[in-house]
Image (cartoon, rainbow, N blue to C red):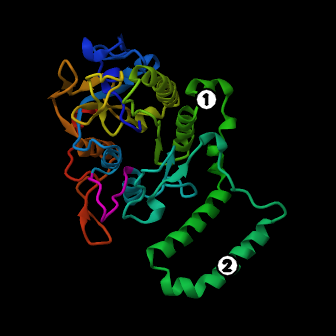
Amino acid sequence: MDGGMSHVDSWDPKQGEVAGPTKTIQTSADGVQLGEYLPLTAKQMHHGVVVRSLTSTQGAHEQGNYFMHTSYQLRGTINHPSMGAWLAHFRGAGNPTLPASVYVGNASRHPGAGFFPPEHGPLFVNNPENGMKDIELQKGLTKDLHTARMQLAGELDAAFVHAFGKQRNVAAHSGAYDGAYRMMASKDIVAFDLTQEKAGLRDAYGRDPFGQGCLLARRLVERNVRFVEVSLHGWDTHAGNFTTTPDLCEKLDHGLATLVNDLHERGMLKDTLVVVATEFGRSPKINGALGRDHYPKAFSATLFGGGVKGGAIFGSTNKTGEEVENDEITIPDLNATIGYALGLPLEEVAISASGRPFKLADKGKPITSIFA
């Protein structure tokens, strides 16, 4: 949820002045309440757990976004891997003919592969409804002629690759060609064609980039793509929070609730972890422009499926949502929890090109108690 989603209008609703006009609604899970703008998700909360005790040290967008993706603070001297890159590093690509991970949305601040090889980074898809462009041979170009051209290109490049092929950028260029060629030949490239889905299901997800991105995520996970991220931008509600947030929540509500239910009905939810996160929360105090400002001190995330105890709450804030009251969780802790759910070795060290050691979630510890 790019921009800083308001926790007090969604996952951690409050009463009194800080609530503004936002009302609280009941959910399918006893004792779990949400903000009124998520009525469809409320019906799926028996599959999920709300973490209401997140805190961060980063209160600016770029720094907060980077911290959430990597567990490390933004530095000019190194680029750290995102979670999808760590997963590719430890487990490889789930489908050898498709990318190891996919990002749907505007990726201007995404850290990608970090110091890992570029092929560990995601394939960036700006608009899921456009399908995958430029994956068919040019008109009149036969498969045999294309193969011959690729062989000729390889022969022409041979001396250069022999001399410089171990350099990161050269290897990345060659790897990109190989990956594109595998995708062109893959029967699973059909995953990117959303027109194969029934119109009613596409409507349920929401006919917007986020909703259709969630549908694309399900289609990719079905074909063993291990990691998919779908972004919903626009949560920076310094002004007009109570007009912008309901509109954004409506998109989130349709896409998220339908994804969770769709995965459940297909028997996939128990093996798929759905995480809703944002770089920081927004101030419980309403400013003079009827907005909420940046607030990293206390905010929320939500997890569905993937072995979590459904219908639960972890941690809490005080009655105004300004302070974490119980079970404080840091960003590295949340990422360690995701890594734990994925079965990744949290204590294993990876060495960057500069020779420095790093772990998937830095010093973060997983919240093991939220799993069944």
Q: Is residue 113 left or right of residue 214?
A: left
Q: Residue 81 at x, y = what percent?
A: 36, 57
- Kind of residue sitting beneath label 1: Arg
Residue extent of the magenta highlight: 72-83
Quadrant containing the N terminus in the rendered view: top left
Can residue 14 be seen in the rendering of this structure? Answer: no
Looking at the image, is mark 1 or mark 2 nearer the viewer? 1
Say which residue label 1 marks: 207
Which residue is at the far right? Answer: 140
- Closer to the chain start, of discs 1 and 2, is 2
Compare residues 209 and 363 and report the one nearer the observer.
209
In the rendered image, residue 59 lying in the magenta stretch gets the answer no
Callout 2: few (<14), some (14-19), or many (20+) C-alpha neighbours within 10 Å?
Answer: few
Q: Secondary structure at mark 1?
A: loop
Callout 1: few (<14), some (14-19), or many (20+) C-alpha neighbours within 10 Å?
Answer: some
Q: Is residue 115 left or right of residue 324?
A: right
Residue 128 sits in quarter:
top right
- Cα–Cα span, label 1 and label 2: 42 Å
Residue 155 sits in quarter:
bottom right
- Kind of residue sitting beneath label 2: Ala
Q: Residue 319 at x, y = what percent?
A: 19, 18
Say which residue label 2 marks: 153
Q: Residue 336 at x, y = what percent?
A: 27, 46
Which residue is found at the position 28% from the left and 23% from the top?
Answer: 312
